């Protein structure tokens, strides 16, 4: 049907400060609103144009259209995400998290491999030898640089390296080179931004698929994509508020297999949130956070019907949501972005 996705006039534009600079951001913004099935979020990164933002909008609308799949597990293991900070801060963040898996950002602009090695070494010390440690370069390296860096970093026993190079051919070449060293490659941007996620599999470019709900158009689309790809899946956030994180949890809870900890503990990176932050305890998050409380407030059934849950498990706190509302100029800019994304969906439908 050729129609724009409806967003209520009462949708809130949020503006959240980050505790540490992350992927070039000091603040995170987005929009949240309530649907008949629960709260949803739309928060494409600021550099994304209307076409890419439209995919994120499709994900935001999915809850009202299809509901969420029923979970097959009650808890989701998660990693702590370590920004490109100094080794002392990295060690503290890993130790305080309670997680047994850490993802460490590397290849930050303006930093050196020495900085990366010091940070990863500090996190390894915090985790101990039994902890799992992965790195994420966000596609910043060429193949030769990535090979040198990963061989050096692998002294700390890497679980895998996430998106070390930008393109699928580069990932495929790097994977061939580092396989003999036991280094696994995970694809993130090459899946969510390439326009053809299955190229990763066709090129034998990755061992693991990173799936993110908003950038891939929704939970159900992610489930279908995971089946087509046939790779082990790690569900990660896109640095959303806890409303968006709840959607990632719903995906992780519904996957038939979940062999790796998921990157869904990123509420720790936010200095404020739209409600009680979804923060892991003992390295895991509940698959349906706040479900019983939300059901009691809204009179919703706490069980699934035909395998689909009809209400979201996360409800924001009105006072906290009001405290993080964006200034009028920023809110206006986000509503203009929304109109552009709605037009893209209308044009493509």
Image: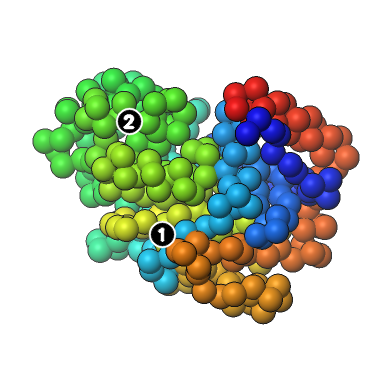
Q: Which residue is mark 2?
A: 198
Q: Nearer the viewer, residue 336 or 1?
A: 1
Quadrant of the image containing the N terminus: top right
Residue 306 visible in the displayed image: yes
255 relative to 58 in the view: left or right: left
| Residue 64 picture location, percent across and down | 63, 52
Secondary element under disc 2, as helix, strand or loop, is: loop
Q: Earlier in the sequence, mark 1 or mark 2?
A: 2
Q: Which mark is residue 254?
A: 1
Looking at the image, which residue is at 79% across and 47% down?
Answer: 8
Looking at the image, which residue is at 53% across and 64% down?
Answer: 309
Q: Which mark is residue 333?
A: none
Looking at the image, which residue is at 84% across and 35% down?
Answer: 332
| Residue 130 picture location, percent across and down | 25, 63
Quadrant of the image containing the C terminus: top right
297 relative to 238 in the view: left or right: right
Vertical side of 54 occupied by 134: above or below: below
Give the quadrant of residue 55. top right
138 relative to 268 in the view: left or right: left
Q: Are marks 1 and 2 in contact (CB under 8 Å)?
A: no
Give the quadrant of residue 48. top right
Give the quadrant of residue 174. top left
Looking at the image, which residue is at 60% across and 24% down?
Answer: 348
Which residue is situated farthest in the front direction here? 1
Q: Nearer the viewer, residue 339 or 156?
A: 339
Residue 97 visible in the displayed image: no
| Residue 294 picture location, percent across and down | 65, 72
User: In 3D space, how far apart are the residues under numbered discs 1 and 2 (Cα atoms)?
Assistant: 21 Å
- For disc 1, the neighbor class at 10 Å (few under 14, some 14 to 19, many from 20) is many
| Residue 248 picture location, percent across and down | 50, 53
Which residue is situated farthest in the right direction here? 328
Secondary element under disc 1, as helix, strand or loop, is: helix
């Amino acid at each position: 049907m050729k129609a724009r996705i409806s967003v209520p006039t009462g949708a809130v534009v949020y503006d959240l400060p980050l505790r540490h600079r992350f992927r070039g951001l000091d603040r995170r913004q987005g929009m949240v609103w309530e649907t008949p099935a629960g709260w949803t979020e739309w928060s494409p990164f600021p550099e994304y144009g209307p076409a890419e933002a439209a995919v994120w909008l499709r994900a935001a609308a999915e809850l009202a259209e299809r509901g969420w799949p029923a979970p097959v597990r009650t808890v989701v293991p998660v990693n702590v995400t370590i920004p490109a900070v100094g080794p002392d801060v990295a060690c503290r963040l890993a130790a305080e998290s309670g997680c047994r898996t850490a993802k460490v950002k590397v290849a930050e602009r303006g930093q050196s491999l020495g900085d990366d090695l010091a940070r990863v070494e500090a996190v390894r010390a915090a985790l101990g030898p039994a902890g799992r440690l992965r790195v994420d370069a966000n596609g910043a390296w060429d193949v030769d640089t990535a090979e040198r860096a990963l061989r050096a970093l692998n002294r700390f026993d890497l679980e895998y390296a996430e998106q070390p190079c930008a393109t699928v051919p580069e990932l495929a070449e790097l994977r061939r080179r580092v396989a003999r060293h036991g280094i696994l490659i995970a694809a993130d941007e090459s899946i969510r931004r390439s326009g053809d996620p299955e190229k990763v599999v066709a090129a034998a470019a990755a061992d693991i698929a990173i799936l993110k709900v908003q950038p891939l158009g929704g939970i159900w689309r992610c489930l279908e994509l995971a089946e087509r790809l046939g790779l082990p899946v790690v569900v990660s956030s896109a640095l959303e508020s806890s409303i968006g994180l709840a959607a990632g949890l719903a995906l992780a809870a519904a996957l038939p297999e979940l062999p790796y900890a998921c990157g869904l503990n990123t509420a720790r990176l936010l200095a404020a949130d739209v409600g009680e932050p979804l923060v892991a305890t003992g390295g895991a998050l509940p698959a349906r956070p706040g479900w019983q409380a939300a059901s009691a407030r809204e009179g919703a059934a706490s069980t699934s019907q035909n395998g689909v849950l009809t209400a979201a498990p996360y409800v924001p706190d009105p006072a906290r949501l009001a405290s993080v509302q964006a200034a009028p100029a920023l809110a206006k800019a986000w509503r203009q972005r929304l109109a552009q994304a709605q037009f893209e969906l209308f044009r493509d439908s």
